[in-house]
Image (cartoon, helix red, strand yellow):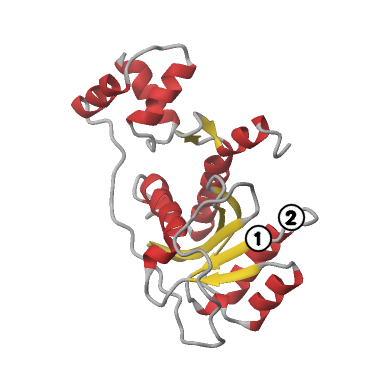
Protein backbone atom coordinates (compact mmCIF):
# COMPACT_ATOMS: atom_id res chain seq x y z
CA UNK A 1 0.00 0.00 0.00
CA UNK A 2 2.89 2.37 0.67
CA UNK A 3 4.04 2.43 -2.97
CA UNK A 4 0.76 3.72 -4.49
CA UNK A 5 0.43 6.26 -1.68
CA UNK A 6 3.93 7.59 -2.37
CA UNK A 7 3.25 7.62 -6.11
CA UNK A 8 0.00 9.61 -5.68
CA UNK A 9 1.74 12.04 -3.31
CA UNK A 10 4.61 12.63 -5.74
CA UNK A 11 2.23 12.98 -8.68
CA UNK A 12 0.50 15.80 -6.79
CA UNK A 13 3.90 17.52 -6.46
CA UNK A 14 3.78 16.66 -2.74
CA UNK A 15 0.68 18.82 -2.27
CA UNK A 16 -2.06 16.32 -1.38
CA UNK A 17 -3.08 15.34 2.13
CA UNK A 18 -4.58 11.98 2.98
CA UNK A 19 -8.14 12.80 1.83
CA UNK A 20 -7.08 13.60 -1.73
CA UNK A 21 -4.65 10.65 -1.78
CA UNK A 22 -7.61 8.45 -0.80
CA UNK A 23 -9.60 9.87 -3.75
CA UNK A 24 -6.75 9.17 -6.16
CA UNK A 25 -6.36 5.57 -4.96
CA UNK A 26 -10.11 4.99 -5.11
CA UNK A 27 -10.14 6.18 -8.74
CA UNK A 28 -7.37 3.66 -9.39
CA UNK A 29 -9.54 0.88 -7.98
CA UNK A 30 -7.61 0.61 -4.70
CA UNK A 31 -10.12 0.28 -1.86
CA UNK A 32 -8.82 1.33 1.55
CA UNK A 33 -10.22 3.54 4.29
CA UNK A 34 -9.07 7.16 4.46
CA UNK A 35 -7.89 6.83 8.06
CA UNK A 36 -5.59 3.95 7.09
CA UNK A 37 -3.98 6.22 4.52
CA UNK A 38 -3.71 8.99 7.12
CA UNK A 39 -1.88 6.67 9.54
CA UNK A 40 0.38 5.31 6.80
CA UNK A 41 1.36 8.78 5.62
CA UNK A 42 2.04 9.93 9.18
CA UNK A 43 4.14 6.85 9.93
CA UNK A 44 6.36 7.44 6.90
CA UNK A 45 6.50 11.22 7.08
CA UNK A 46 4.52 11.74 3.89
CA UNK A 47 2.97 15.12 4.50
CA UNK A 48 2.83 18.54 2.83
CA UNK A 49 4.83 21.23 4.56
CA UNK A 50 2.68 23.80 6.32
CA UNK A 51 3.59 27.40 6.95
CA UNK A 52 1.60 30.53 7.67
CA UNK A 53 1.58 32.95 4.76
CA UNK A 54 2.52 36.61 4.95
CA UNK A 55 -0.26 38.87 3.73
CA UNK A 56 0.34 41.59 1.16
CA UNK A 57 -1.27 44.86 2.25
CA UNK A 58 -2.40 47.00 -0.68
CA UNK A 59 -4.32 49.56 1.37
CA UNK A 60 -3.16 53.06 0.46
CA UNK A 61 -5.89 55.34 1.73
CA UNK A 62 -9.43 56.29 0.82
CA UNK A 63 -8.97 57.35 -2.82
CA UNK A 64 -12.67 57.05 -3.63
CA UNK A 65 -15.76 56.26 -1.55
CA UNK A 66 -15.91 52.59 -0.64
CA UNK A 67 -18.98 50.61 -1.76
CA UNK A 68 -20.98 48.69 0.81
CA UNK A 69 -20.07 45.18 1.92
CA UNK A 70 -22.81 43.32 0.04
CA UNK A 71 -21.35 39.89 0.75
CA UNK A 72 -21.16 40.10 4.55
CA UNK A 73 -19.02 36.91 4.67
CA UNK A 74 -21.59 34.85 2.73
CA UNK A 75 -19.24 33.43 0.13
CA UNK A 76 -21.72 31.20 -1.69
CA UNK A 77 -23.26 31.38 -5.15
CA UNK A 78 -25.87 29.18 -6.80
CA UNK A 79 -24.33 29.46 -10.27
CA UNK A 80 -21.03 30.52 -11.89
CA UNK A 81 -20.27 34.21 -12.41
CA UNK A 82 -22.61 35.51 -9.74
CA UNK A 83 -20.10 36.26 -6.99
CA UNK A 84 -16.39 36.86 -7.54
CA UNK A 85 -13.73 37.66 -4.95
CA UNK A 86 -10.30 39.09 -5.66
CA UNK A 87 -7.05 39.97 -3.92
CA UNK A 88 -3.30 40.31 -4.48
CA UNK A 89 -0.62 38.24 -2.75
CA UNK A 90 3.17 38.48 -2.62
CA UNK A 91 5.94 35.90 -3.06
CA UNK A 92 9.56 36.53 -2.12
CA UNK A 93 12.51 34.62 -3.60
CA UNK A 94 16.19 35.54 -3.84
CA UNK A 95 15.72 37.05 -7.29
CA UNK A 96 13.04 39.44 -6.05
CA UNK A 97 9.34 39.77 -5.31
CA UNK A 98 6.50 38.45 -7.43
CA UNK A 99 2.85 39.43 -7.13
CA UNK A 100 -0.26 37.47 -8.08
CA UNK A 101 -3.60 39.12 -8.69
CA UNK A 102 -6.32 36.47 -8.82
CA UNK A 103 -10.10 36.36 -9.16
CA UNK A 104 -12.06 33.45 -7.68
CA UNK A 105 -15.63 32.34 -8.43
CA UNK A 106 -17.49 31.61 -5.19
CA UNK A 107 -19.71 29.07 -6.93
CA UNK A 108 -16.98 26.43 -6.71
CA UNK A 109 -13.67 28.14 -5.99
CA UNK A 110 -12.48 28.22 -9.58
CA UNK A 111 -9.69 30.71 -10.34
CA UNK A 112 -11.38 32.55 -13.20
CA UNK A 113 -8.47 34.79 -14.11
CA UNK A 114 -5.05 35.80 -12.83
CA UNK A 115 -2.14 38.06 -13.62
CA UNK A 116 1.44 37.73 -12.37
CA UNK A 117 4.06 40.47 -12.26
CA UNK A 118 6.96 41.99 -10.34
CA UNK A 119 5.04 45.05 -9.17
CA UNK A 120 1.63 45.21 -7.45
CA UNK A 121 0.35 47.86 -9.81
CA UNK A 122 -3.19 48.86 -10.66
CA UNK A 123 -2.44 47.63 -14.18
CA UNK A 124 -1.88 44.10 -12.85
CA UNK A 125 -5.32 44.06 -11.24
CA UNK A 126 -7.00 45.77 -14.19
CA UNK A 127 -5.58 43.30 -16.72
CA UNK A 128 -6.79 40.39 -14.62
CA UNK A 129 -10.27 41.89 -14.38
CA UNK A 130 -10.50 42.47 -18.14
CA UNK A 131 -9.46 38.84 -18.67
CA UNK A 132 -12.22 37.65 -16.30
CA UNK A 133 -14.90 39.84 -17.89
CA UNK A 134 -14.06 38.43 -21.31
CA UNK A 135 -15.62 35.08 -20.32
CA UNK A 136 -18.95 36.55 -19.20
CA UNK A 137 -22.04 35.57 -21.15
CA UNK A 138 -24.96 37.82 -21.96
CA UNK A 139 -26.84 38.68 -18.80
CA UNK A 140 -24.07 37.69 -16.39
CA UNK A 141 -23.34 40.57 -14.01
CA UNK A 142 -21.34 39.32 -11.03
CA UNK A 143 -20.86 41.01 -7.71
CA UNK A 144 -17.10 41.51 -7.33
CA UNK A 145 -15.87 41.63 -3.74
CA UNK A 146 -12.45 42.87 -2.63
CA UNK A 147 -10.62 44.39 0.30
CA UNK A 148 -10.05 48.15 0.46
CA UNK A 149 -6.77 48.07 -1.46
CA UNK A 150 -5.96 51.02 -3.66
CA UNK A 151 -6.11 48.83 -6.78
CA UNK A 152 -9.87 48.54 -6.34
CA UNK A 153 -10.42 52.25 -5.71
CA UNK A 154 -8.83 53.75 -8.83
CA UNK A 155 -11.02 55.15 -11.64
CA UNK A 156 -9.73 52.54 -14.16
CA UNK A 157 -10.92 49.62 -12.00
CA UNK A 158 -14.26 51.28 -11.39
CA UNK A 159 -14.66 51.99 -15.12
CA UNK A 160 -14.05 48.33 -16.02
CA UNK A 161 -16.63 47.24 -13.46
CA UNK A 162 -19.19 49.72 -14.76
CA UNK A 163 -18.61 48.86 -18.42
CA UNK A 164 -19.32 45.17 -17.75
CA UNK A 165 -22.17 45.73 -15.30
CA UNK A 166 -20.28 44.40 -12.26
CA UNK A 167 -21.50 45.37 -8.80
CA UNK A 168 -18.67 46.32 -6.45
CA UNK A 169 -18.52 45.17 -2.83
CA UNK A 170 -15.77 45.83 -0.27
CA UNK A 171 -14.60 44.51 3.07
CA UNK A 172 -14.27 46.67 6.14
CA UNK A 173 -10.85 48.27 6.55
CA UNK A 174 -8.24 45.83 7.90
CA UNK A 175 -10.77 43.00 8.31
CA UNK A 176 -9.38 39.94 6.53
CA UNK A 177 -12.33 37.64 7.45
CA UNK A 178 -14.48 39.89 5.26
CA UNK A 179 -12.53 38.55 2.27
CA UNK A 180 -12.06 35.03 3.60
CA UNK A 181 -12.74 33.28 0.28
CA UNK A 182 -9.80 35.00 -1.38
CA UNK A 183 -7.65 34.57 1.73
CA UNK A 184 -8.44 30.86 1.78
CA UNK A 185 -7.49 30.42 -1.85
CA UNK A 186 -4.15 32.14 -1.32
CA UNK A 187 -3.57 30.08 1.81
CA UNK A 188 -3.96 26.82 -0.11
CA UNK A 189 -1.80 28.14 -2.93
CA UNK A 190 1.00 29.14 -0.54
CA UNK A 191 0.91 25.78 1.24
CA UNK A 192 0.86 23.65 -1.90
CA UNK A 193 3.03 25.66 -4.26
CA UNK A 194 5.24 28.08 -2.36
CA UNK A 195 6.06 26.52 1.02
CA UNK A 196 5.89 22.99 -0.34
CA UNK A 197 8.74 23.51 -2.83
CA UNK A 198 12.08 25.31 -2.88
CA UNK A 199 11.90 28.19 -5.35
CA UNK A 200 14.65 30.31 -3.85
CA UNK A 201 17.23 29.70 -6.57
CA UNK A 202 14.83 30.25 -9.45
CA UNK A 203 14.87 33.27 -11.71
CA UNK A 204 11.85 35.56 -11.74
CA UNK A 205 10.73 34.17 -15.10
CA UNK A 206 11.10 30.56 -13.93
CA UNK A 207 9.03 31.26 -10.82
CA UNK A 208 6.31 33.00 -12.83
CA UNK A 209 6.13 30.06 -15.27
CA UNK A 210 5.87 27.57 -12.39
CA UNK A 211 3.19 29.65 -10.66
CA UNK A 212 1.15 29.89 -13.85
CA UNK A 213 1.47 26.10 -14.33
CA UNK A 214 0.26 25.55 -10.77
CA UNK A 215 -2.81 27.74 -11.29
CA UNK A 216 -3.74 25.82 -14.44
CA UNK A 217 -3.25 22.56 -12.52
CA UNK A 218 -5.36 23.88 -9.63
CA UNK A 219 -8.21 24.72 -12.00
CA UNK A 220 -8.03 21.69 -14.30
CA UNK A 221 -6.51 18.80 -12.34
CA UNK A 222 -6.47 19.34 -8.55
CA UNK A 223 -9.07 17.18 -6.82
CA UNK A 224 -11.68 19.15 -4.91
CA UNK A 225 -12.75 16.72 -2.19
CA UNK A 226 -16.36 17.92 -2.27
CA UNK A 227 -16.65 16.74 -5.89
CA UNK A 228 -14.11 13.93 -6.05
CA UNK A 229 -12.71 15.51 -9.20
CA UNK A 230 -11.28 18.82 -10.37
CA UNK A 231 -13.29 22.03 -10.54
CA UNK A 232 -13.07 22.15 -14.33
CA UNK A 233 -14.16 18.53 -14.78
CA UNK A 234 -17.04 19.04 -12.37
CA UNK A 235 -18.26 21.99 -14.43
CA UNK A 236 -17.91 19.93 -17.57
CA UNK A 237 -19.98 17.13 -16.02
CA UNK A 238 -22.70 19.68 -15.25
CA UNK A 239 -22.54 21.09 -18.76
CA UNK A 240 -21.38 24.49 -17.49
CA UNK A 241 -18.27 24.65 -19.66
CA UNK A 242 -16.74 22.89 -22.63
Q: Are marks 2 and 1 in contact (CB under 8 Å)?
A: yes
Q: Residue at x 42, y 75 (%)?
A: 172
Q: Picture quarter containing residue 124?
A: bottom right
Position of 93 compared to 240: left or right?
Answer: left
Can you give x and y, in whole percent of width and height, for residue 24 in the image? 45, 23
Above or below, 126 against 193 in this view is below
User: Within 10 Å of the Cα at label 2, are there few (<14), some (14-19), or many (20+) other Cα atoms?
Assistant: some
Of discs 2 and 1, which sits in the foreground? 1
Q: Splitting the image into 4 quarters, where does residue 22 fall?
A: top left
Residue with the mark numbered 1: 142
Q: Which of the numbered marks, if any, corresponds to residue 201? A: none
**Residue at the (66%, 66%) spot, across then down:** 127
Q: What x and y, as percent, mark residue 171? A: 46, 71
Instruction: Check the image and report above or below for 133 versus 153.
Output: above
* Residue behind mark 2: 136
Q: Position of residue 224 (x, y in %)?
A: 48, 36
What residue occupies the far left of the structure in this picture?
Answer: 43
Pick out the residue farthest to the right: 138
Q: In screen coordinates, is 116 left or right of 164?
A: left
Badge 2 element: loop
Between residues 66 and 57, which one lies in front from this camera angle? Answer: 66
What whole-number distance in Å separates the C-alpha atoms at marks 2 and 1? 9 Å
Q: Earlier in the sequence, mark 2 or mark 1?
A: 2
Which residue is painted at 60% across and 33% down in the image? 234
| Nearest to the observer: residue 240 or residue 14 | 240
**Taking the image as drawn, is residue 101 in sight?**
no
Residue at the (74%, 55%) spot, across then down: 136
Name the spot of residue 105 as percent of width and height, x first: 58, 52
Amino acid sequence: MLAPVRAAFEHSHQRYGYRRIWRVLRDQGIRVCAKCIMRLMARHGITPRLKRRKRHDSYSGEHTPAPANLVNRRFHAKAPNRLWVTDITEFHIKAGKIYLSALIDCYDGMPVAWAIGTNPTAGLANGMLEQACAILKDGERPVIHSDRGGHYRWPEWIAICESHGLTRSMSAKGCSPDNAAAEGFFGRLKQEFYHNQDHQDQSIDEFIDDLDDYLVWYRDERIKTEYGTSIRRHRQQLGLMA
